[in-house]
Image (spheres, rainbow, N blue to C red):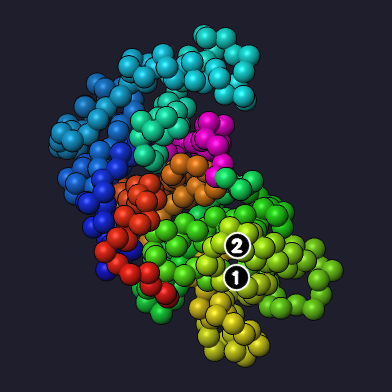
Amino acid sequence: MSLIETLAERLTRHPKRVVFPEGSDSRILQAARQFATRRLGVPILLGDRTVIKENAARLDLRLDGLRIIEPARADEFPDFVTKFQGLRRFKGLNEFEARDYVASNNYFAALMIATMGADAVVAGATQSAASGLRPLFQVLPLQEGVTTASSMAIAETSNPQIGINGHLFLADCGVLPNPTAEQLADIAITTAALAHHLTNQTPRVAMLAYSTKSRDPKNPVIGKVQAATILAHRKAKERGLAIEIDGELQLDAALDPITAKQKGVDGSVGGRANVLVFPDLNSGNIALKMIQAVASARTYGQIITGLSRPAAEISRGASAHDILGTAIIVAAQAVDRSFLYSQAPDAHA
């Protein structure tokens, strides 16, 4: 069973509320309909009620089990305006300016999950990444002990020998163009923690580079990855996380046991990595698109990591199937892991 189907099965016992800022988009409507039909929780569609109903009718989709909210007319609107004005970043805004922000679907969605009015948010179907991410980063605090928000994508391959039953967790493929060593360490820790939450298996993190165990630490890229590996080990120990980390590793040494052995990589990560941390956004995003185009792998995300509440920023090219899978992931992220895997013993990849 795929990870998405496993999580969906568990969500039927712990359903969640997922808010979609682009509620009138046809792909969102199709994904939301499936989410509700499979009893995974309550989809919340933001947007013009009339337009949403017209688009649903055109697609021959029922709206029962779905909640529709027009932000400016919502019961929560006045309280959200007050809360928004209280945010440190927006202190000094007058009420008129604050109301304009809160009437925006993306800001309203961020405030919904910040105030526990929803459990997770899936945005980005029709807007640039910056438009969807900005409200999340401005409204939601970071997790305790984390200084960096980043993103993770999940690749579902056809090879069960790779990663966790064919699933790889890739970061950062969507947020930070050129992370520092400190930021790379945060990316490694938050991605690994989420991978463990979703799979209940031990994260094996490969800090990737174009060389394996180089003896030339003066190279700035290699030096950064080596420093990030040391910092990630320290952060994992401080937080008491059972995470296995190694770097710097080339991709083949991270995923292929024979290559890892030939390159002298000892330990449990070489050849068996399930979390891949890229040195920069260029390499991460290119690798993700390559997997999609060449290997025809199903991918989900970007899942935003490091924030205090579950959120995802999907691609404008995402299909309804991709959106449903991403919604399942962030909804499962909102379930306490002790409940998510309450009937399964802690397993190891």
- Rendered-image quadrant of the N terminus: bottom left
Q: Secondary structure at mark 2?
A: helix
- Any mark on residue 236, and which? 2
Residue 192 in percent (x, y) is at: 52, 61
Q: Amino acid at mark 2?
A: Ala
Q: Is residue 133 above or below residue 159?
A: above
Answer whether residue 10 is visible to the viewer in this image: yes
**Mark before the other along the chain sequence, 1 or 2:** 2
307 drawn magenta: no
Residue at figure coordinates x 40%, y 39% from the top left: 121
Residue at figure coordinates x 80%, y 78% from the top left: 215
Specify start and end residues of the magenta stretch as a single range. Answer: 123-143
- Any mark on residue 329, and which? none
The image quarter in which residue 3 lies: bottom left
Q: Amino acid at mark 1?
A: Ile
Q: CA distance from mark 1 to mark 2?
A: 9 Å
Q: Secondary structure at mark 1?
A: strand
Query: Are the residues flagged by discs 1 and 2 in contact, CB closer than 8 Å?
Result: yes
Answer whether residue 325 is visible to the viewer in this image: no
Residue at figure coordinates x 50%, y 47% from the top left: 304
Name the front one of labels 1 and 2: 2
Q: Mark 1 — residue?
A: 245
The image quarter in which residue 280 lies: bottom right
